[in-house]
Image (spheres, helix red, strand yellow):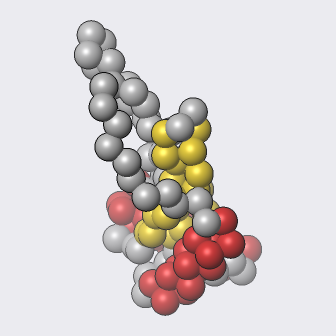
């Protein structure tokens, strides 16, 4: 269902080349008492379909990174790479990682 009635169906119906969604919930600080919280992951639809998905940095929320995902139908990797690269160049959202002492 994620192929014919999912991604492929939407591509055909709406004439789009790709889809964009937040990669997941924003990063969170580790809670040593209660553990990590569950998050929404947008890559599931593409993964179940066996289709390509590319994630790039989108920005930061309270100093923690947030990603954006681009996914599409089978064999759409060249298109997704072009879209993701254009997004990266337009936003310059990626910051080099830093080591922060606790």
Q: Of residues 6 and 102, which is closer to you in this image?
A: 102
Q: Please say if 68 is above or below 72.
A: above
Residue 92 position, x and y percent, is 61, 66
Which quadrant holds residue 58? Answer: bottom right
8 with respect to 45 (left or right): right
- Which residue is rendered at x = 41% and y = 74% of the image? 52
Residue lying at the far front in this picture: please name it: 101
Q: Quadrant of the C terminus?
A: top left
Q: Please say if 24 is above or below 16.
A: above
Residue lying at the far top in this picture: please name it: 33
- Which residue is rendered at x = 26% and y = 16% of the image? 32
Residue 70 position, x and y percent, is 54, 68
32 with respect to 26 (left or right): left
- Which residue is rendered at x = 44% and y = 69% of the image? 53
Which quadrant holds residue 36? Answer: top left
Residue 81 position, x and y percent, is 50, 82
- Which residue is rendered at x = 36% and y = 62% of the image? 47
Q: Of residues 63 and 15, which is closer to you in this image?
A: 63
Residue 10 seen by the camera? no
Residue 65 seen by the camera? yes
Q: Quadrant of the N terminus?
A: bottom left
């Amino acid at each position: 269902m994620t192929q014919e009635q999912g991604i492929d169906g939407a591509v055909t119906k709406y004439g789009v080349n790709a889809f964009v969604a937040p990669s997941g919930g924003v990063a969170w600080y580790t809670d040593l008492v209660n553990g990590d919280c569950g998050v929404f992951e947008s890559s599931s639809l593409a993964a179940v379909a066996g289709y390509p998905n590319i994630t790039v940095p989108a920005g930061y929320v309270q100093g923690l990174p947030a990603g954006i995902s681009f996914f599409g139908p089978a064999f759409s990797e060249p298109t997704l790479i072009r879209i993701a690269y254009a997004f990266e160049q337009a936003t310059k959202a990626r910051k080099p990682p830093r080591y922060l002492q606790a």
